[in-house]
C-alpha cells in the first residue's frame, strides 16, 4: 500500500510542476483556476476542485496551469484503496406525495359565438373540458376570444385535460361549429 499524501503547489502563470510520486489515485482538492494533469497514461485537461482519476497507476504527475495567472493547487495522491472522507447515505425517492383537491363539475353550453366557458381561477390545479357531442367540435382559447381556427380543437367525444404540471389560471373561452352544443362538461380542481 502506497502512502496517501496531500501536496500543495504554487504554479506560475501558464507554468508546470512535476510531482515525482507514485500512486493509483489522485484528486484535485483545491485550485484557484483550471489545471491539467499529464502522466504516462495521457492528459486530463481543464480539471477543477473535486476531479481526478482512480485505479490508474502512475509514477509521476505533471500539473499544468491552465490560466494566465498564478494557480495554487492542492492534490491528494494515494492508492486505489483510498477513501476520501465522503460518507453518508443518499436517498432518492421518486414517489410524488399524494395531493387532494375538491373538484367542481359543471355542464356547459357552447354556441357558435365565442363566450367564456370557464372563469379565470388563480388556484386552479386541474382542468378537464369534455365534448360529449356526437358530431360537433369545440374550440377553446386561453385569455382571449375563441375562433374556429388558431385555437385548441376538442373533437366530438374528445377531451382536453391539464393537471400534471402546468395548468392555466386564465379565463377559457369557447366557440362551437354548431349553433348550440349543450353536451360540454368542465371540471376544475
Image: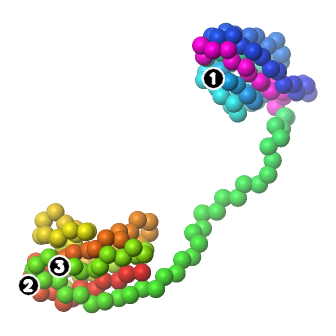
Residue 106 can be seen in this image: yes
For residue 125, side relative to residue 140 (left or right):
right
Disc 1 secondary structure class = loop
Q: CA distance from mark 2 to mark 1?
A: 70 Å
Q: Could you tell me if the residues under marks 3 and 2 are in contact, i.e. CB atoms within 8 Å?
A: no
For residue 146, side relative to residue 6 (left or right):
left
**Position above or below: 30 against 70:** below
Residue that numbered label 2 is attached to = 179
Q: CA distance from mark 3 to mark 1?
A: 61 Å
> Magenta segment range?
67-80
- Foreground mark, 3 or 1, reads 3
**Position above or below: 30 against 21:** below
Q: Could you tell me if the residues under marks 2 and 1 are in contact, i.e. CB atoms within 8 Å?
A: no
Local packing at callout 2 (Cα closer than 10 Å; few below 14, some 14-19, many 20+) is few
Q: CA distance from mark 3 to mark 2?
A: 13 Å
Residue lying farthest to the left in this orientation: 179
Indicate the quadrant where residue 106 lies. bottom left
- Nearest the viewer among 53 and 70 is 70
Local packing at callout 3 (Cα closer than 10 Å; few below 14, some 14-19, many 20+) is some
In the image, residue 111 lies at what x, y percent?
13, 83
Disc 2 secondary structure class = loop
Q: Would you say residue 151 sits in the magenta stretch?
A: no
Question: Colour scheme of this structure image?
Answer: rainbow
- Identify the disc placed on residue 115: 3
- Residue drawn at x 84%, y 28% is 79
Residue that numbered label 1 is attached to = 34
Amino acid at each position: 500500500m502506497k502512502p496517501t499524501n496531500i501536496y500543495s503547489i504554487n504554479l506560475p502563470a501558464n507554468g508546470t510542476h512535476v510531482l515525482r510520486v507514485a500512486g493509483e489515485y489522485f484528486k484535485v482538492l483545491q485550485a484557484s483556476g483550471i489545471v491539467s494533469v499529464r502522466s504516462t497514461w495521457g492528459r486530463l485537461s481543464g480539471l477543477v476542485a473535486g476531479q481526478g482519476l482512480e485505479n490508474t497507476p502512475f509514477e509521476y504527475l505533471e500539473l499544468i496551469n491552465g490560466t494566465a495567472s498564478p494557480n495554487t493547487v492542492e492534490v491528494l495522491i494515494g492508492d486505489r484503496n483510498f477513501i476520501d472522507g465522503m460518507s453518508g447515505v443518499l436517498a432518492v425517492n421518486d414517489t410524488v406525495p399524494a395531493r387532494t383537491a375538491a373538484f367542481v363539475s359543471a355542464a356547459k353550453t357552447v354556441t357558435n359565438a365565442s363566450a367564456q366557458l370557464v372563469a379565470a381561477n388563480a388556484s386552479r390545479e386541474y382542468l378537464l373540458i369534455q365534448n360529449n357531442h356526437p358530431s360537433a367540435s369545440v374550440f377553446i382559447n386561453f385569455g382571449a376570444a375563441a375562433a374556429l381556427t388558431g385555437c385548441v380543437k376538442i373533437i366530438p367525444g374528445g377531451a382536453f385535460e391539464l393537471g400534471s404540471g402546468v395548468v392555466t389560471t386564465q379565463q377559457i373561452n369557447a366557440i362551437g361549429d354548431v349553433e348550440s352544443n349543450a353536451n360540454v362538461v368542465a371540471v376544475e380542481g
